[in-house]
Image: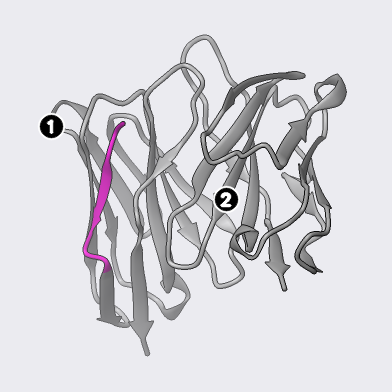
Amino acid sequence: DTGVSQDPRHKITKRGQNVTFRCDPISEHNRLYWYRQTLGQGPEFLTYFQNEAQLEKSRLLSDRFSAERPKGSFSTLEIQRTEQGDSAMYLCASSLGRTSGYNEQFFGPGTRLTVL
Amino acid sequence: GIQVEQSPPDLILQEGANSTLRCNFSDSVNNLQWFHQNPWGQLINLFYIPSGTKQNGRLSATTVATERYSLLYISSSQTTDSGVYFCAVTYNQGGKLIFGQGTELSVKP
């Protein structure tokens, strides 16, 4: 078990470009979450998947953002036509959601996006 | 929506001192987690503690769900304890975490 991994760790792009991030959850974890963290703030929820189904999206997730989790394994987060306001740390977390309610989340190292 | 407030926002300690960090939440929660964010941004799990008391080495945590607060205790602090401590709660079946603003701890040698 190598934990949650994210790729790339850093991304610098120009305004208007598209970017895609990847998250590999802990194996056997059925839930996968994306969060965004800006400087000096706590992480904010973006979206989550249970297996391959995207079950909830935040209002923070504008039409320029799309997330997928094909086959219920890894997930991708794409941002189209990036804006300077998209600069942030993008964090992925996974959990083994159980009917008992146990749902401890484990985070990856994050992808730091800088939009010039 | 549910509000999560952490106090104090900043804390400076001498090595060896003890400290208590507080997390208040505005409504009933399913789960509560404490994290330590290191200087590289990695969130490290400290406790999963929807209720009760847990201890792990020099750290311990207590959640009193009926009174809507949780406490994180750090004893005999070390410089490596420096960083930001976050409390986060979930309140629905989906389990999305709602984070507080964090407590930034600086431990001086």
Q: Label 1 crowding class (10 Å Cα cut-off): few <14, some 14-19, many 20+?
A: few
Tag 2: residue type? Arg
- Where in the figure is residue B9, as x and y percent of width and height? 26, 66
- Residue position for label 1: B67
Q: Residue at x 50, y 61 (%)?
A: B37
The magenta stretch is B1-9
x, y (%) of residue B17?
24, 76
Based on the picture, tell me whether residue B5 belongs to the magenta stretch. Answer: yes
B57 lies above or below B91: below
Residue that badge 2 annotates: A36
Q: In the image shown, does B104 or A18 lie closer to the viewer? A: A18
Could you tell me residue A40's position as x and y percent? 43, 67
User: Quick one: label 2, few (<14), some, or many (20+) residues within 10 Å?
Assistant: many
| The C terminus of chain A sits in image quarter | bottom right
Q: Chain of mark 2?
A: A
The single residue placed furthest to the right in the displayed view is A71
Residue A112 covered by magenta stretch: no
- Quick check: can you spot residue A26? no
The residue under label 1 is which amino acid type? Glu
Looking at the image, the residue that sits furthest to the top is A99
